[in-house]
Every structure is written in structure tokens, then in C-alpha cells.
Amino acid sequence: MNVANEVYLELKSETARLGAAKEQILIQNLGLGWEDSYHPWSAVGHTYNSEELLEHLLEVVIPMSSTRDIPLEPPMNVPKMPEIQSLGTVLHLAMDQERMLEDKLESLKEKGWAEKNMCEERGEGDGWAEKQHLLPPKMSNLKGFRIEMTFENTGDDGSLCLAWYQGTIEKILNVKTNRIRVRWDEDCMGNNDARVTTHKLVVGNWNPKKLKKGGWREYITE
């Protein structure tokens, strides 16, 4: 709860605070399927502000995670066979229908994962982006930070493309101008690439929703 309060206070605008509060509520409501975590955005002519939604998040939503098991995957609301008491032997037709529904559900999951992968290939978010903090870390805490940054490189067909490179921040050169020195991991470097380089971290480039030159985030591996 302290973290939620700190992040809320660091956000500079009501729009950003409102978006963050809504996102956290939706993660539990839609992502985890906890229907009782729901809160309307407006009711009876009143539009709830970020402070009201934060109160719901702190008092109702966040405590749920300490008393409930987190599902391994989000719920899928698809039609199911009605559960009714059977008289005698279950007909093969009913069993076939149930198998068809299970196959349809599995097919729907596969299509969902395929669509997610296609979006990531287009640079439209990825699983690692979803695990990042909402706000970038403070510059004074970045020494030793495992970082990913996007740089332009030349693809096999000669076209320019963007890719993530991983390394460790060795030194904070200037806290005020956000300049840092990075030692890059060997396994992501080309033969002629510099192993140690300096950069200015732009706060607005933290964890970009779409790939962009100079984007940066924490290097997460699990």
C-alpha cells in the first residue's frame, strides 16, 4: 500500500493518476477475474476522481491479493454446457458437445497467444514491458542497475531496425542531466560494438509502449 501511495503522489497530473488507478483495478477485475474488485468510473451523474479510485484500490483491491490465490492465466468467458442433473447414462451427443467446447476454448487460447506474439513482433508492447514499474527508478539508485536500451541496427536485409540491448550501469556520471555509463553484456554485442558507452536517460522514454530509439527499462529475466 505504501508503494501505491508513493507512486500516486509522484505522478504529475490527474490524468496520469486516474489512468494508473484504473489500470490497477482492471488488472484484478479483468485480469484475475475477481469480480468483487470492480469499481465504476462514474455513477448517478458523478465521475469518480483518482483520489476516490485510489481509496478503493487501497481498501478493497490490494488486500485481496493477500487472501486469494493468483490464477495462472486470465479467465475466459465462453459459453459452457449447463450443469444439470443427469438421469441415467449421459448421451454420447452430450459428451461430444462438451469435447467440442473444450476444443473451442483451447483454440481460442492459441489464437490469443498468436495475436499477442504478432503484436510484440510489431513492437506493440511485450510481456517484459508489462512487468516494469510505472515510474522510472531514481537516478541516484541506478548504480548496478540492470538496464535494457533500444538502439538502431542494420538487419540482414540491410534495413534499419530497433532492438533491445542489455547491460549494467557502472556509474552515474551526472544526476542532474541523467547521464550514466553502461557496460554492455557480451552476448548482445557485435564484434565492432563498444563494450562501455555513456548515455543520457530520457525520463519520457522509460518503458515505451512502442519500440523507439533511446527507450529504456529494467532488464528482467523471469
Image (tube, rainbow, N blue to C red):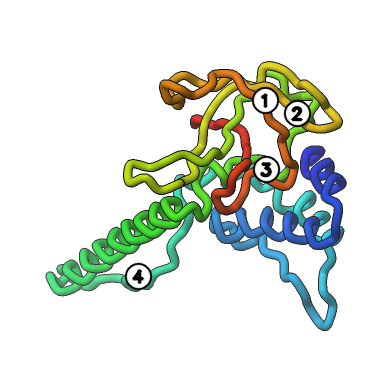
| Disc 2 to disc 1, C-alpha distance | 7 Å
What kind of residue is marked 1?
Thr
Determine contact: label 2, label 1, CB under 8 Å. yes
| Secondary-structure class at tag 3 | loop
Pointer 2 or 1: first along the chain: 2
Residue under label 3, please give it: 206
Determine contact: label 1, label 3, CB under 8 Å. no
| Secondary-structure class at tag 2 | strand
| Disc 1 to disc 3, C-alpha distance | 17 Å
Picture coordinates of residue 102, whole percent (x, y): 27, 62
65 sits left or right of 4 in the view = left
What kind of residue is marked 3?
Trp
Pointer 1 or 3: first along the chain: 1
| Secondary-structure class at tag 1 | strand
Picture coordinates of residue 221, whole percent (x, y): 50, 30
58 sits left or right of 111 in the view = right
Badge 1: residue crowd in 10 Å (few <14, some 14–19, many ≥20) = some
Q: Nearer the viewer, mark 1 or mark 3?
A: 1
Q: Name which residue lies at 82% across and 32% down.
A: 177
Pointer 4 or 3: first along the chain: 4
Q: Nearer the viewer, mark 2 or mark 4?
A: 2
Determine contact: label 2, label 4, CB under 8 Å. no
Q: Quadrant of residue 114?
A: bottom left
Residue under label 2, please give it: 179
Badge 3: residue crowd in 10 Å (few <14, some 14–19, many ≥20) = many
| Residue nearest the viewer, comparing 119 with 76 | 119
Badge 2: residue crowd in 10 Å (few <14, some 14–19, many ≥20) = some
| Residue nearest the viewer, comparing 100 with 14 | 14
Picture coordinates of residue 27, whole percent (x, y): 61, 54
- On residue 80, the disc is 4
What kind of residue is marked 4?
Lys
